[in-house]
Amino acid sequence: MTVETLPFPTVKRSTRLDGEGSVQVQLDPKVKIGNAKVFAIYGKGGIGKSTTSSNLSAAFSKMGKRVLQIGCDPKHDSTFTLTKKMLPTVIDVLETVDFHAEELRVEDFVFEGYNGVMCVEAGGPPAGTGCGGYVVGQTVKLLKEHHLLEDTDVVIFDVLGDVVCGGFAAPLQHADRALIVTANDFDSIFAMNRIVQAIGAKAKNYNVRLGGVIANRSAATDQIDKYNDRIGLKLAAHFPDLDVIRRSRLKKSTLFEMEPSPELEAVQKEYMRLAANLWIGGETYCAVPMKDRDIFDLLGFD
């Protein structure tokens, strides 16, 4: 039996190290996103990055901005509350044309969602066979070739879990700001510390800067605040653990489409506030991550 291999390039050591011993995915330096403001959303797996990304996209669209959301997870579920369906991934559609990208049409991989938000699911290589960074690079290249980035004001990358390898750190090579979604618990903050380290490494050679922390699914923020104070970070937004947010996912809807209520209005206002602050630039942070052992000593109750 002949086993076909997909054309994923080998990850090689970079000549522009982002850190000592760094191994990085090489993206085409000529493929730039352009004039759009670019945000990359990171955080522990299952923390609510897709919910945050989709509602932030909706908020930007409410401001009259032309928004493109790119899901960077093989699960390809980043945009389903915007489009009401699971989209085919860029890798899926490339495979149908034997990876001859010139045969693709825009409508094969870009779909319009809520309030005009354009949605793309980059997907990922089959498990154990390739690098997610290549997929991100190919997606941006396709969007560029079809001139889709020229008419875009905001690009949001919704990035897989808390992976900090060169592959899934690839959106940081395009982003202006990276935001970290976390809950008020040890595991989420521990993952956030690793992401802070990855963003700091990329910031040495790229324009990306840390844009703050989004507290999600958390009534309190005391543990997040304790960590932020120690390393030099601040909250950019806070979303409590509300049932309406859970129900919005089940209804395949953004929070801006749900039945009105006082608690929902407060969450919508927080998303609009976050979008407005990000649009004008917002604060950036040169946070210094902690040693793993020091996080154990810092967090928790005496």
Image (cartoon, rainbow, N blue to C red):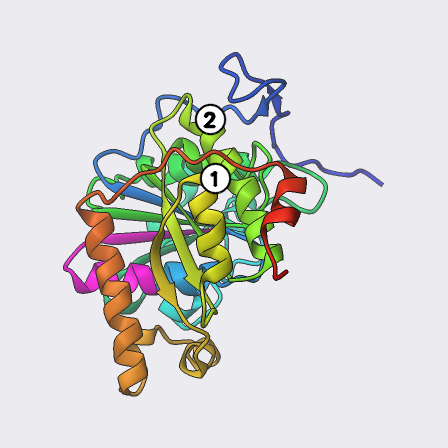
Tell me what residue is drawn at x 23 percent, y 41 percent. 36
Residue 94, compared with residue 120, is above or below; it is above
Tell me what residue is drawn at x 36 percent, y 49 percent. 234
Q: Is residue 254 visible?
A: yes
**Which numbered disc covers residue 90?**
none
In magenta segment, residue 58: yes
Amino acid type, callout 1? Val
Circles 1 and 2, Cβ within 8 Å, touching? The answer is yes
Amino acid type, callout 2? Leu
Left or right: 277, with 137 as reference point = left
Sequence order check, earlier mark of 1 and 2: 2
Left or right: 19, with 151 as reference point = right
Residue 248, compared with residue 292, is above or below; it is below
Residue nearer the viewer, 280 or 66? 280
Mark 1: which secondary structure?
helix
The residue at which mark 1 appears reads as 136
Tell me what residue is drawn at x 61 percent, y 59 percent. 300
Residue nearer the viewer, 90 or 52? 52
In magenta segment, residue 43: no
Mark 2: which secondary structure?
loop
Give x and y (percent) for residue 207.
Answer: 33, 28
Q: Residue furthest left?
A: 64
Residue nearer the viewer, 212 or 29? 212
Residue 232, compared with residue 108, is above or below; it is above
Give x and y (percent) for residue 265.
Answer: 25, 79
Query: Which span is picked out in magenta?
Result: 55-71
The residue at which mark 2 appears reads as 27
Residue 207, compared with residue 250, is above or below; it is above
Q: Residues within 10 Å of mark 1 (few under 14, many from 20)?
A: many
